[in-house]
């Protein structure tokens, strides 16, 4: 059987660890090893992990003496990997039955592949789910091999964002080690940059099926306006795209064109976020987002959305709200001139 090593970084997720590890150990058709990397969790992670180690010899456990952060923890796990393939699986996520065999089999069939991923389910605290769909027109269960350029353009068409559900991403360990691990300067977009870097050096396999579950809860929900985290998200994605261009230009001839195509949507997204911030009365955040949009793409000033927001800022929130109210009631004032008056 083909071998795959699964690295499970864990911090404060002791209550999810059993389900995560169990989903990997139950995989058929692959030779699996697991390393739980505990980043000095203050909960019961050591107790739960030691119990799992005693229960199954395929499970290994190490604990960081102090908290070193997720990037360093990831790279510590990568250094442990010996199998040809690996999966980095957060302790609060889990994989679906037969996921690893399917991914590894596809990669064995196409040795030039550096990455294989599939669709996933988002699981919420109320146990509702939402499928994370990838914009590829394929029948259920089908597979497709993308070139590096095709993969990057798929990211562009999806809003210049990360399209790979991390718990579904099986990587070629040789390529990962050769290209280096996660970048310490990209704590919020390390996955995105990693997938782009791998795609620049090999094919990318895709499985049109739900192969993993990504848990959505209070400690990992999408970034919002609080503490300017929307700015951080845009800045980190831009930094990931810049890093991709700087390190992969020689490997992917179209890298410079793809870099521009990745960067351009960020300016528009910054302006749209600025519009929302304005509507919510966050004027300082609105200004910061507009400054970021200008930095990302100076031509954004010529767009209608920029000019509309500039006008609203000129007349102020009160006048904007008054105009919005006026336009909302205008249709109610219209009367059919042919209507019979009584």
Image (cartoon, helix red, strand yellow):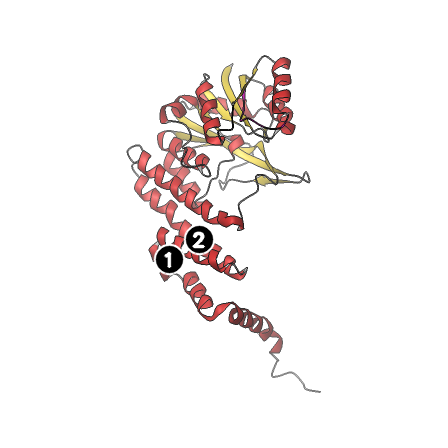
Observer-nearest residue: 124 or 49?
A: 49
In the image, the segment drawn in magenta is 35-43
Q: Residues within 10 Å of mark 2 (few under 14, many from 20)?
A: many
Residue found at the far right of this picture: 342
Observer-nearest residue: 283 or 99?
A: 283
SS for tag 1?
A: helix
Task: Point out residue 65 in the picture as x, y percentages from the top left corner.
Answer: 52, 22
User: Which residue is drawn at the image coordinates 45% and 36% (left, top)?
Assistant: 187
- Quarter of the image where the C terminus is located: bottom right
Do callouts 2 and 1 mark residues in contact (Cβ within 8 Å)? Answer: yes
Residue found at the far front of this picture: 66
Q: Which mark is residue 300?
A: 1
As displayed, is residue 286 above or below residue 196?
A: below
Q: Is residue 159 visible?
A: no
Task: Point out residue 100 in the picture as x, y percentages from the top left corner.
Answer: 54, 23
Q: Earlier in the sequence, mark 2 or mark 1?
A: 2
Task: Point out residue 250 in the picture as x, y percentages from the top left corner.
Answer: 28, 33
Observer-nearest residue: 6 or 91?
A: 91
Q: Residues within 10 Å of mark 1 (few under 14, many from 20)?
A: many
User: Which residue is drawn at the image coordinates 51% and 37% (left, top)?
Assistant: 138
Asked where in the image residue 185 lies, by quadrant, the reply is: top left
Observer-nearest residue: 226 or 98?
A: 226
As displayed, is residue 49 above or below residue 11?
A: above
Q: Which mark is residue 270?
A: 2
Whether residue 323 sits left or right of residue 44 in the image: it is left
Q: CA distance from mark 2 to mark 1?
A: 10 Å
């Amino acid at each position: 059987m083909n071998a795959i090593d699964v690295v499970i970084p864990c911090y404060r997720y002791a209550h999810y660890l059993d389900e995560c590890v169990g989903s990997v150990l139950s995989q058929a058709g692959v030779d699996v090893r697991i390393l739980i990397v505990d980043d000095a969790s203050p909960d019961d992670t050591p107790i739960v992990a030691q119990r799992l180690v005693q229960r199954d010899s395929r499970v290994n456990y190490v604990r960081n003496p102090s908290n070193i952060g997720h990037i360093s923890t990831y790279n510590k796990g990568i250094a442990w990997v010996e199998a040809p393939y690996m999966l980095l699986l957060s302790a609060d996520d889990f994989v679906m039955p037969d996921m690893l065999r399917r991914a590894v089999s596809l990669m064995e069939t196409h040795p030039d592949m550096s990455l294989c991923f599939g669709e996933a389910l988002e699981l919420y605290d109320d146990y509702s789910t939402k499928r994370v769909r990838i914009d590829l027109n394929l029948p259920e269960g089908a597979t497709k091999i993308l070139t590096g350029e095709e993969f990057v353009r798929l990211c562009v068409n999806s809003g210049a964002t990360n399209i790979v559900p991390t718990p579904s991403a099986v990587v070629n360990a040789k390529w990962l080690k050769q290209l280096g691990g996660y970048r310490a300067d990209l704590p919020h977009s390390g996955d995105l940059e990693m997938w782009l870097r791998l795609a620049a050096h090999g094919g990318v396999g895709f499985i049109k099926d739900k192969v993993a579950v990504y848990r959505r809860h209070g400690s990992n929900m999408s970034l919002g306006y609080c503490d300017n985290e929307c700015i951080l998200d845009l800045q980190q994605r831009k930094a990931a795209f810049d890093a991709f261009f700087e390190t992969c230009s020689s490997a992917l001839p179209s890298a410079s064109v793809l870099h521009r195509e990745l960067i351009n949507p960020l300016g528009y997204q910054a302006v749209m976020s600025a519009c929302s911030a304005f509507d919510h009365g966050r004027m300082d955040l609105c200004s910061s987002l507009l400054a970021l949009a200008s930095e990302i793409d100076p031509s954004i000033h010529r767009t209608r959305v920029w000019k509309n927001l500039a006008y609203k800022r000129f007349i102020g929130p009160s006048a904007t709200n008054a105009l919005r109210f006026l336009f909302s009631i205008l249709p109610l004032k219209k009367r059919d001139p042919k209507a019979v008056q009584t």
